[in-house]
Each structure stands twice: as structure tokens, then as C-alpha cells.
Image (cartoon, rainbow, N blue to C red):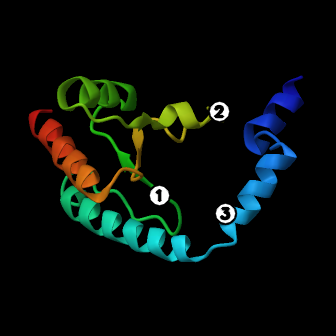
Amino acid sequence: MEKFLLYRTYHGCALPPATQTASAAAWSDEAHVVANRALYRQKFERVLALLSDTLAPQKPQAGFYLWAKTPISDTEFARRLYAEQNVTVLPGQFLARDHGNGNPGENRVRMALVAPLDECVDAAARINSLLAVL
């Protein structure tokens, strides 16, 4: 069971054939891909500009997440950010395992830039508001 758990952790689940067929049809349209990439470029540019002097996250080569090192524990940072600023981030330690040298996600948070641009910008400003009082 231990080896199966490890396999499932990284493999995910199989999709039913109907879902696979629908996905193939949806992904055959490239226009939405071009539009989404442009939206993510805008989100990254605006959010990174706001957080570069505080959390200094690095722009990823791909994806829609920003990772940032936190000045306090990742779980406490996420808890306070939600309680005080109504912004949700995911503590990094929840996404990794301790490999004997510590958890590589510890004291980091993952920020998903999936909301509309104005909400991402607002969230970045709220993150800076919390950081100002830490």
C-alpha cells in the first residue's frame, strides 16, 4: 500500500472516457489558450510589481502559481492572511514531504493567480498590508 500511495500522490486519478472526449474537444481550440496566456502575463506583471519589495516571489517559467518565502511560519502566515485580510494562500508544507532534511515547502506559501486581474492585484495589496504589521 505504501508504494501505491506514493504512486497515486504523483499520478492523480484516471478520467472517465466521456470526460476525456470532452477535454479533447475543449483543448482543440487554441484561441482560449492565447487569451489565457495574455491574462496570466498581466496578472504576474502586476502582482510581482506589488510584492517584489516585500515577499519577492520569483516568476515561474510555467504555471499560474507564485511561491514566496514567509517571514513567519507558512501556516501562521496563511491563517493570519485569511483572518485579517480575507486572502487565501496555501501553506507550502502541505504540498511537500519531509525528505529527512526538512520539508522544502515549509515557510513558503503558494499563491494561485486564477482570480480575475483586479482581484489578484487587490490580494497582493492585502498581503502587503499584513506584512506591514508583522
**Marks 3/1: CA distance?**
20 Å
User: Would residue 132 appear left or right of 54 to someone viewing this image?
Assistant: left
58 over 3 or under it: above or below? below
**Residue 30 appearing in the image:** yes
Residue type, label 2: Gly
Neighbourhood count class around disc 3 (C-alpha, 10 Å): few under 14, some 14–19, many 20 upward: few
Neighbourhood count class around disc 2 (C-alpha, 10 Å): few under 14, some 14–19, many 20 upward: few
Neighbourhood count class around disc 1 (C-alpha, 10 Å): few under 14, some 14–19, many 20 upward: some
Question: Which of the 4 image quarters holds residue 52?
Answer: bottom left
* Label tally: 3
Instruction: Specify which label sits upstream in the sequence, 3 or 2.
Output: 3
Task: Tell me the mark number nearer the camera, choosing from 3 and 2.
Answer: 3
Instruction: Specify which label sits upstream in the sequence, 3 or 1.
Output: 3
Q: Residue at 50%, 40% (x, y): give it.
A: 105
User: Would residue 82 appear left or right of 108 to someone viewing this image?
Assistant: left
| Numbered badge on residue 100 | 2
Nearest the camera: 22 or 110? 22
Q: Are marks 3 and 1 in contact (CB under 8 Å)?
A: no
**Residue 124 at x, y = what percent?**
23, 50
Q: Secondary structure at mark 3?
A: helix
Residue type, label 1: Phe
User: Would residue 50 appear left or right of 116 to someone viewing this image?
Assistant: left
Residue type, label 3: Ala
Q: Secondary structure at mark 2?
A: loop
Q: Residue at 56%, 37% (x, y): give it.
A: 95
**Residue 29 at x, y = what percent?**
63, 73
Question: Which of the 4 image quarters holds residue 48?
Answer: bottom left
Q: Secondary structure at mark 1?
A: loop
**Marks 3/2: CA distance?**
42 Å
| Numbered badge on residue 26 | 3
Tag 1 residue = 64
